[in-house]
Amino acid sequence: MEKRPADCTTIEEIRAEIDRLDKAIIALIGKRFQYIVAGAKFKTAASLRAPERVAAMLRQRRTWAVEAGLKGDVIEKLFRDLFNHFIFIEDEIKKLRR
């Protein structure tokens, strides 16, 4: 059962909640990856990188981060790294389909 941070009374409870959240975040990244794989069939090699789309996506994630009280630079880097990893995977998928 989820506990609010203020309701945790030990460091073990804090760590358990962080672990629970990290597991949920990883599951969501996995689900996002499924959409990346599904979307690869609609993209050409040239459209994989889509610099305008990437720039807009990163700006939006930065805005969401700031709205959530987080550092925009950190979240932008996180999503840039995810994007680059997923582009690599999409490239590999495209190679296999040739």
Image: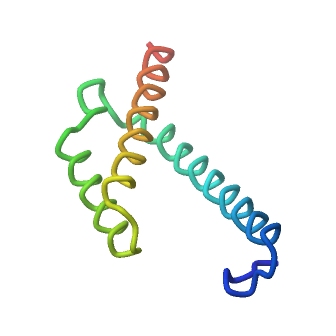
Q: Which residue is pictured at 53% across the width and 43% down the height?
A: 33
The x and y percentages for residue 53 are 23, 47
**In this rendering, position of residue 9 left or right of residue 48:** right
Q: Which residue is pictured at 39% across the width and 74% down the height?
A: 69
Residue farthest left in this picture: 52
Q: Which of 98 and 31 is in front in this view?
A: 31
User: 66 above or below 53?
Assistant: below
The x and y percentages for residue 22 are 66, 57
Tell me the quarter of the picture where residue 15 sits.
bottom right
User: 25 above or below 67?
Assistant: above
Q: Which of 53 and 95 is in front in this view?
A: 53
User: 93 above or below 71?
Assistant: above
- On-image quarter of the N terminus: bottom right
Q: How many numbered circles are shown?
A: 0
Q: Which of 31 and 81 is in front in this view?
A: 81
User: 23 above or below 89?
Assistant: below
Q: Nearer the viewer, residue 82 or 41?
A: 82
**In this rendering, position of residue 81 left or right of residue 73:** right
Tell me the quarter of the picture where residue 24 sits.
bottom right
Q: Which residue is pictured at 32% across the width and 60% down the height?
A: 72
Residue farthest bottom in this picture: 7
The x and y percentages for residue 26 are 63, 51
* Chosen colour scheme: rainbow
Q: Which residue is pictured at 45% across the width and 35% down the height?
A: 86
- On-image quarter of the C terminus: top left
The x and y percentages for residue 18 are 69, 63
